[in-house]
Image (cartoon, grey):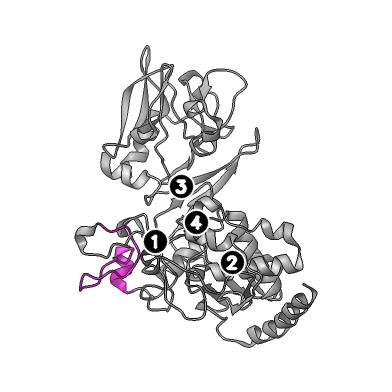
């Protein structure tokens, strides 16, 4: 290991000097003065070279923390990663310019998988998948590591803010594409250009709607690949991803759409923004601020239990963009199906009496009128509201189907969910915002019994 460590250290010394003299930075797209974006999503080869560097310089324990979630990557890829080799793959990865390391140089993939990967000689094509199955913290660590080792603290790498990502996404698009907000996934010859989940009736190949290798489709005018489709890309706001992914349709993958997440996913990756400069504040400073989406997204930490919730500004209302998961000291509330493992994703189900009391200070249970104000943004249209307020929609409200509790029974999550309002209809009936997962609709209902278990979305108090 010592000899390898010495070689890597010498390589980095030469490499950093070379990078600082380059214009633009390797494998990046220049967006504005001293601001660059990675030209593709971070690939598996680059991630494994990060793993190799870590195991050499910081030990096996720290390196193991970089392993992806085996349940959130392609099975063939996990088989490749876990079957490490005593051989050494000297191929230099795209975003680190460091060798991949102790993994197999060649691999066997079946015909279906081969159709989804580029065919490069002399190395395993699986290395060209985008890295998925990693957490926000792991992605953040990769960018920070690039600042330290490759940027020599003179180039800051980090996850982009949602606003910076949007600027990057529209950079180089035609005026019609900017107006539409997204690129369609078919050419004028009805051929696939981008990786979306397109119905087969459109004449696309069988692998549309599957994860594919990076740079498999035509680049944007500015040379960037896979900005829309393939995998959603993490931003600096934990839980907020952009760009759409292979599970979505083209019209769900535009510059304003949000894909919320709570854990590693097979459809979730990232790319870094790079900023030339040595000032420490660049690590947190937003360098692109001229996109018309100021202060739309944020986070709120509940001081009662330390849980953090994403927030979203819709019109003049600031909403929680996740279900409340506060555990009160008393009263009736439940985890879906009485299984606490669901709370992180679904929050708790509360009776109405408890729901009126559990939003944190500065926030409150919305009234019927406040829900109506939310829906007016979508013309009170039940299906449009569902599409836009759903986790795959443009609003960032990020509703997911999470079930209800009636009596002693829990409804299936696929059937939908509902949120309490503070408005009472009559003696035993309360208004609530109902989400019908089967009809794909959202509307206000006045039929919820006080003892029913519903979800809560808090809205911020007026200042």
Q: Which residue is mark 1?
A: 255
Does the CB distance between marks 1 and 3 fall below 8 Å? no
Q: Nearest to the eye among marks 4 and 1: give it.
A: 4
Q: Secondary structure at mark 4?
A: loop
Residue 179 lies in the magenta stretch: yes
The residues bearing labels 2 and 4 have C-alpha atoms spaced at a distance of 13 Å
Residue 272 lies in the magenta stretch: no
Does the CB distance between marks 2 and 4 fall below 8 Å? no
The residues bearing labels 1 and 3 have C-alpha atoms spaced at a distance of 17 Å
Q: Using the image, tell me which numbered label, if any, was put on residue 313.
A: 3
Could you classify mark 3 by the number of other residues whose Cα lies within 10 Å: few (under 14), some (14-19), or many (20 or more)? many
Q: Which residue is mark 4?
A: 73
Query: Residue 404's quadrant in the figure?
Result: top left
Does the CB distance between marks 4 and 3 fall below 8 Å? no
Query: Looking at the image, is mark 2 or mark 4 earlier in the sequence?
Result: 2
Whether residue 356 appears in this view of the structure is: no
Where does residue 101 sit, x and y in percent of width and height? Answer: 64, 72
Could you classify mark 2 by the number of other residues whose Cα lies within 10 Å: few (under 14), some (14-19), or many (20 or more)? many
- Give the number of marks: 4
Quarter placement of the N terminus? bottom right
Query: Residue 306's quadrant in the figure?
Result: top right
Q: Secondary structure at mark 1?
A: loop
For the point 31% across and 69% down, which residue is it?
Answer: 177
Q: What range is drawn magenta here?
A: 174-199
Q: Nearest to the eye among marks 1 and 2: give it.
A: 2
């Amino acid at each position: 290991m010592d000899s390898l460590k010495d070689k890597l250290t010498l390589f980095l010394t030469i490499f950093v000097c070379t990078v600082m003299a380059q214009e633009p930075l390797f494998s990046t797209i220049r967006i504005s003065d001293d601001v660059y974006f990675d030209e593709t999503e971070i690939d598996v080869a680059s991630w494994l070279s990060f793993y190799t560097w870590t195991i050499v310089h910081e030990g096996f324990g720290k390196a193991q923390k970089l392993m992806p979630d085996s349940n959130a990557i392609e099975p063939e890829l996990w088989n490749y990663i876990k079957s490490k080799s005593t051989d050494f793959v000297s191929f230099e990865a795209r975003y680190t310019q460091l060798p991949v390391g102790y993994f197999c140089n060649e691999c066997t993939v079946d015909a279906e998988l081969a159709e989804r990967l580029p065919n490069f000689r002399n190395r395993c094509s699986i290395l060209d998948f985008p890295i998925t199955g990693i957490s926000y913290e792991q992605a953040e660590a990769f960018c920070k590591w690039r600042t330290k080792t490759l940027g020599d603290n003179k180039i800051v790498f980090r996850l982009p803010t949602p606003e910076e990502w949007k600027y990057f996404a529209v950079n180089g698009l035609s005026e019609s594409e900017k107006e539409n907000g997204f690129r369609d996934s078919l050419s004028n010859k009805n051929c696939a250009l981008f990786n979306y989940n397109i119905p087969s009736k459109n004449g696309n190949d069988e692998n549309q709607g599957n994860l594919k290798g990076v740079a498999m489709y035509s680049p944007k005018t500015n040379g960037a690949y896979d900005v829309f489709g393939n995998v959603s890309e993490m931003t600096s706001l934990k839980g907020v991803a952009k760009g759409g992914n292979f599970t979505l349709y083209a019209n769900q993958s535009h510059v304003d759409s949000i894909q919320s997440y709570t854990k590693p996913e097979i459809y979730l990756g990232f790319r870094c923004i790079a900023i030339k400069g040595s000032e420490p504040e660049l690590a947190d400073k937003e360098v692109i601020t001229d996109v018309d989406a100021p202060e739309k997204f944020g986070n709120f930490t509940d001081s009662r239990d330390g849980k953090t919730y994403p927030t979203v500004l819709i019109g003049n209302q600031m909403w929680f963009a996740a279900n409340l998961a506060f555990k009160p000291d008393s009263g009736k509330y439940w985890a879906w199906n009485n299984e606490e493992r669901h709370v992180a994703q679904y929050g708790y189900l509360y009776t109405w009496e408890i729901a009126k009391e559990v939003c944190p200070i500065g926030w409150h249970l919305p009234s019927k009128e406040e829900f109506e104000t939310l829906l007016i943004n979508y013309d009170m249209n039940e299906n449009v509201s569902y599409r836009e307020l759903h986790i795959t929609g443009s609003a960032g409200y990020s509703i997911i189907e999470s079930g209800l509790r009636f009596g002693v029974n829990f409804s299936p999550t696929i059937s939908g969910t509902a949120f309490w309002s503070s408005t009472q209809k009559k003696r035993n009936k309360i208004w609530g915002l109902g989400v019908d997962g089967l009809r794909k609709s959202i509307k206000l209902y006045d039929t919820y019994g006080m003892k029913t278990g519903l979800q809560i979305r808090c809205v911020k108090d007026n200042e």
